[in-house]
Image: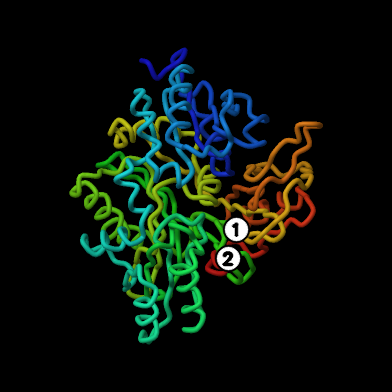
Amino acid sequence: MSCLSGSRLIVLVIGKGAREHALAWKLSQAPSVRHVFVYPGNAGTQDGLANVSNLALAGFTENPVNQATDYEQVAQTAKALNVGLTVIGPDDAVVDGVEEHFRHVAIPCFAPSKAAAELEASKVFAKAFMNKHNIPTAAHRSFNDVEDAIAYVKHVDHRIVIKADGLAAGKGVVLPETTAEALVELRGILQDDKFGAAGSSVVIEEYMEGDEISLLTFSDGATFKSLPPGQDHKRIGEGNTGPNTGGMGVYSPVPFVTCSTLDQIDRDIIGPTFAGLRAEGRPFVGLLFTGIMITPTGPKVIEYNVRFGDPETQSSMMLLSDDTDLAAVLLSCTTKTLDQVRLVTRPGFACNVVVASGGYPGPYAIGKEITIAPHPKDVMIFNAGTKKDDSDGTLRTAGGRVLSIAAFGPTLREAVDKAYRGVQSVHFDGMVFRKDIASQGLRSL
């Protein structure tokens, strides 16, 4: 088979965050995998794992301006290297339809089509899709005119959430406390281009009370299989205070989510989502990340993402059993044979704590030296915003979210304690992290 080299698979992971480091780490353990390339990767994928390396291309920039042209070059290079599976991590690459470049050179790609990816590309589209297919979500209205949006907000009698239509690096959701604050935010988004083109339209929806969970679901277009649900912590501060971030930590599974609730989610949300996409001629192949609120009247969709979540992926990779060949699972989705592979998690819990640069999600400094001391077994330190100093090889900060400290334990308490011991083993000036990851889960036990 063309996708194999020495009867084992060569895999390419696209991205440079902790999510991609975690995927590369788990893929490298798969019996079916010979080597994992990561593009562009980070300091963690640069070295430290025997059969993982960053893919280097002459003249190729780390942050390409013309993605269509650049990813065509990556696909051609992957073909020359006999890559048999590409896995796309970042939301913008998935939404921009990068998977097409790999399909054009006959490399299976674990990512949805651009048409299916509209579920994340446009919240306006996603809400209309949910209405059309009777998928439960918050009551909402969509606007592209600032004055119309302001007039609507002035007359609602409930708390609202404002969401930019397009991709905004996980920061396009605003939860105003007052009407006055909501009006300021609407002017900032629709009038002052706070989120650029992503804010050309907004969804204004009713604030939902309940417990938020994240569900990662593999799909081959017909069959779907989900990982245990996780609970993300999006705000920068303890007690869910401060601005939204890309995610400051997560734990999984969520002990207060029952099997009957998960069955209801499959029946009312996940199944109808994939069926609706098939009915619209855009079958979903890849991973669907569904943000769900468990409300007093049942589970409702908060949002869809069409790729692996970050930080959810890091904890999910810690949960996967040795009986699960991750590469085989991903490849089976591209060949519509997901029903023929095993997706098994080990009994226990995982916790992931994100360590960020001081100032994040606002302005922050980079270039801070990172030191890492020995840390407990069953703890992985996944790199995100990191870079090796070219002059002396020193590990330095290069982003807002710098490291993900992920741990596994037979109980949630043990997983959380291990993760925080892992956090204590790393240091850089100004580092920040939340000290209450999994607190709700621990209280529920």
In the rendered image, the vertical position of residue 406 relative to residue 435, given as above or below: above
The residue identified by callout 1 is: 248
> In terms of sequence position, does the residue under pointer 1 or pointer 2 come before the other?
2
Residue 222: image location, x then y, percent: 24, 42
Which part of the image, by quadrant, shows the N terminus?
A: top left
Q: In the depicted view, which residue is nearer to us: 41 or 288?
A: 41
Compared with 431, 335 (above or below) is above
Q: Residue at x 54, y 32 (%)?
A: 39
The chosen color scheme is rainbow
The residue under label 2 is: 235
Q: Position of residue 441 (x, y in %)?
A: 54, 64
- Above or below, 119 relative to 184: above
Question: How far from the left and from the top, in percent, is residue 52?
Answer: 59, 27
- 310 or 177: nearer the viewer: 177
Secondary structure state at the residue bearing disc 1 = loop
Q: Residues within 10 Å of mark 2 (few under 14, many from 20)?
A: many
Residue that extends furthest to the left in the rendered view of this protein = 279
CB under 8 Å between discs 1 and 2: yes
Could you tell me residue 365's position as x and y percent? 73, 53
Residue kind at label 1, given as amino acid type: Met
Tell me which corner region of the image, top left, top right, bottom left or bottom right, holds residue 146. bottom left
Real-space Cα distance between discs 1 and 2? 7 Å
Q: Is residue 281 above or below residue 72?
A: below
Q: Left or right of 245: which side holds 66?
A: left
Could you tell me the amino acid type at mark 2? Answer: Arg
How many numbered marks does the figure carry?
Answer: 2
Name which residue lies at 50% across and 35% down.
14
Give the structural element (helix, strand or loop) at label 2: strand
Q: Name the residue at 43% across, 41% down.
A: 344
Q: Residues within 10 Å of mark 1 (few under 14, many from 20)?
A: many
Image quadrant in which the C terminus is located: bottom right
Front residue of 108 and 91? 91
